[in-house]
Amino acid sequence: MKRKLFFPFLIAIFCTAFFSFVEKEDPLRKTYAQTITAADLKMRLSIIASDSFEGRETAKKGQHMTAEYIARQFMSFGIPPLPGTEPLDNPIPNYYQDVPLLQLTPGNGTVSANEKKYSFGNDFYYTPGISDTKLDATQIVFAGYGIQDSLYKDYDGIDVKGKLEMIVADEPLDKKGNSIITHKKDLSAWSTNRRKKTNEAKSHGAIALFVIVPDYQKRFNDYKDYIEKPTLDLYEPNLSKKKSDNIPVLYISKQMADELLLAGNQKQTIDKIVARISKKKTPIHLEFPLSLEINILRDSKILHSENVLGYIEGTDLKNELVIVTAHMDHLGIDSSKTGDKIFNGADDDGSGTVSVIEMAQAFAQAKKEGHGPRRSMLFMCVTGEEKGLLGSRYYTDNPIFPLANTVVDLNIDMIGRIDDAHKTDSEYVYVIGSDKLSSELKTINETEDATYCGLKLDYRFDVPNEPNNFYQRSDHYNFAKNNVPIAFFFNGVHADYHQVSDEVSKIDFPLMEKRARLVFYDAWEIANRDQRLVVDKK
């Protein structure tokens, strides 16, 4: 009798547990999540990551084409234009936030010493990060290689504060070609990290740094495309004239250095000084008066780009906003290459862009069918991420909707590939920053994943002092800086990262579908829950 009663009792418990588990799934959100399909993702990505979109470089033809494509998709879903805005001069209503940019092109500038003028390219060059500079110097200190290390100390016994410092590139070598610092052919960080010497000179108070490049013409030719590459920043009046915290660094030819030494009544040449250092294995310093003027003025041009915004108004909690972001821009065309020159950026970040489009379609369909979100949704494809998170920074500096009302930013940047760490464990996604500002967001993401997706959530990049610093390297960071909780979804870097080989053919679309659906489930849950996400961390 007991046994007969026992088995029905077990069956009842099992059925209760099973159906309770099933009831945790929301059939409504699952229905709309399933509209995000591998086939649709592939169809859209095959368009924006094709050669005709020219690599989607910020403020260039392909990026504008991408913006128009996204806007047309939003319009086709029935998402209205941004509230309170007027159409721009284009054939579609306004889904754009104009992002004004300042392009600065290197190439102009002179250095004058004793009435002789030295010019960019012929005698010196600078890297794109320099600021426009007008500077007078009256004292030059030759500080050897500019190294201050436990094994080699160029700064001992000299004072460069308020003076122009001149150093030799790389590091001292002995007669066998071994580094005096490492005692091997391998060079130290003083050679491999160009900022190290600059930071050292700045910390000692130098007002500018001349780096003597022994093989000047070869290095200039090898890096010409990088040296002369224009830089972009958000446009602000007088942005190009703003003072930088960095000191100006100019890379000069050996001939220019010898002429400066001669003008300062120094009878030694750079070759002789380097030979003496190599022989003695100790630093050599010189200081001499010389009237010298540096004048760096880059060519400037105002350009325009755009963020594309698809806004779906919520119901009873419509004043609160959930944002989903991805960057539509990539690296454009490398004209110096032969063969394939177009950086199509299928994974970076075409994968995120088309996922945002698919999610916008799912939420728009839900609203059309009477199941719209309680909180408002903003699906935003931003520009200028590759140029320094410019589009997201412009939005957070000039928000269309108050940041105080913004509940979360779910940011997608590369979700179409598998990295080397997961070759045998591909059902994963890296999640970064989900618990930085809100103790609830990480739990929500884990719950949605366990209920609907079953991905492995990998947090290896979500630790303090993580050397790759991915937390600060995509658009979510501009929201986090403004105290908006974020979660960043990422598949990790791979051999095709920032290469012309980042192609649609290498995307794992079924896996991408699963990752995109996870972000959708998070957005649905956060948009419809009773309580706003708590912000309980700084």
Image (spheres, rainbow, N blue to C red):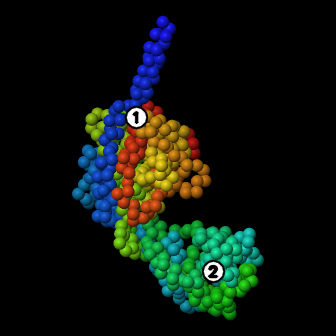
The numbered dot on residue 168 is 2
Q: Residue at x 51, y 83 (%)?
A: 218
Mark 2 residue crowding within 10 angstroms, few (<14) / some (14–19) / many (20+)? many
- Please tell me whether residue 235 is drawn above or below residue 153 in the rendered image: above
- The percent coordinates of residue 267 (x first, y second) are 68, 93
Please tell me in which quadrant of the rendered image residue 321 appears: top left
- Please tell me whether residue 430 is drawn above or below residue 213 in the rendered image: above
Q: Amino acid at mark 1?
A: Asn
- The percent coordinates of residue 35 (x first, y second) are 31, 41
Residue at mark 1? 528
Q: Secondary structure at mark 1?
A: helix
Q: Amino acid at mark 2?
A: Val
Q: Residue at x 51, y 70 (%)?
A: 129
- The percent coordinates of residue 178 (x first, y second) are 67, 77
- Please tell me whether residue 433 is drawn above or below residue 97 in the rendered image: above
N-terminal of the two: label 1 or label 2?
A: 2
State the residue lying farthest toward the top.
1
